[in-house]
Image (spheres, helix red, strand yellow):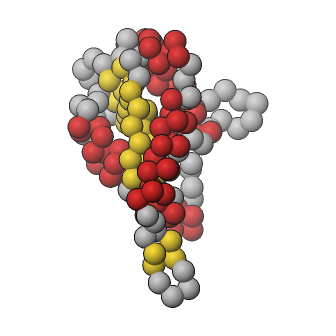
Amino acid sequence: MGRITHILVPTDFSAASDAALAWARDLAHQYEARVLLLHVVTDPRASGMWTPEVYVPANAETQQRLLREARERLERALPTDERSRFAVTIDARLGDAAENILETAREHNVDLIVMGTHRRHGFMHLVLGSTAERVLRDATCPVLTTHAAPQGQAA
C-alpha cells in the first residue's frame, strides 16, 4: 500500500459517520493527510416527491437549499484548527450516494475512503441496499468501514 495523503470521508451525519470521521482524523494526523468531507443529498425531496397521482420533481431552489444546509453542517463537523491542520475541503452533491462517493474519489485521486455503515440486515438491506457495500465493491482505492459503537463503548 502506498502512502496515505488524501482521505475521503462521506457522511450522512449519523453516529456511524461520526465514528468514521474520528477514524479519519486519527489517520490524517498519523499520515499528515488531507481530508475531504462529502455529503450526498439523497433525500427524496431533493430529487422529487410522490403525490397520489404523479411524481413531482423538487425545484432547483429546494435542491440548492438542501446543498447549502449540507455544506454548513460539513463546515461545523470539525473545529477550525482541525480543518486547517488537515487541509479539509468539503463537497455536497445531489444524487445516488455510492455513485457520488466513487466519482469524488476518482476526481480527487484519494488514497483511502473512510465511511460509516449502518449494518442493515434482511429486508432493510434488501430494500435500501448498502452504500458501503457498493463503494467497497467498486472503489479503486482501499475503503475502511466502521459503525457507531453501542452506547458506552468506544468506536
Name the quadrant of the C terminus. Answer: top right
In front: 140, or 101? Answer: 101
Residue 15: x and y in percent read 62, 39
In front: 35, or 92? Answer: 92
In this view, 27 is above or below 92:
above
In front: 144, or 56? Answer: 56
In front: 128, or 65? Answer: 65
Residue 80 visible in the current orientation: yes
Residue 144 visible in the current orientation: no
What's the residue at 57%, 55% (across, down)?
Answer: 120
Q: Residue 104 appears in which quarter of the rendering?
A: top left
Residue furthest toward the right?
152
Residue furthest toward the bottom?
53
What's the residue at 51%, 63% (across, down)?
Answer: 45
Residue 130: x and y in percent read 46, 55
In this view, 82 is above or below 21:
above
In this view, 28 is above or below 135:
above
